[in-house]
Image (cartoon, rainbow, N blue to C red):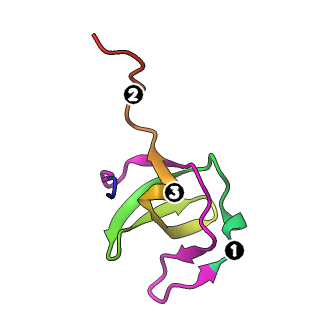
Amino acid sequence: MSTEFAINSKVRVVALPPYVKTADPMPMLRPPDVIHIGEEGTVIDRRPGGYWGIRFAKGTFLLDSQYIESTDTPDISHKE
């Protein structure tokens, strides 16, 4: 099951994939160390195959939702 993110929402990397795909018109594979765990980016679009286009400081990359989490939602630690 894929998590949904709103366009322009902030997300954080929680795990690194074996490689990272650029979001260029002709995507290229890059080593995973171009981004780091904990790095934050902005969702720019939804791509086919369950990928999200995310803008980071070093460029825009395609990541699956299993590698990212939203930072826009408040942390709810208890229920009333």
Residue type beneath disc 2: Pro
Tell me if residue 59 comes above or below residue 29 in the rendering: above
Please report whichever mark, 3 or 1, sits nearer to the chain's N-terminal start: 1
Q: Quadrant of the C terminus?
A: top left
Percent coordinates x, y for residue 41 in the rendering: 52, 53
Which numbered dot is residue 77?
none
| Residue at horizontal 49 percent and vertical 52 percent from the top | 68
Mark 3 vs mark 1, foreground winner is: 3
Residues at marks 3 and 2 touching, judged by CB atoms closer than 8 Å? no
Residue 7: percent from the left, percent from the top? 32, 55
Instruction: Pinpoint residue 21: horizontal percent, then vertical percent.
Output: 54, 76
Residue at coordinates 38% horizontally, 22% vertically from top-left? 76
Label 2 sits on residue: 74
Report the residue at 41% width, 57% height from top: 43
Q: According to the image, label 3 marks what residue?
A: 67
**Residue 49 figure quarter:** bottom left
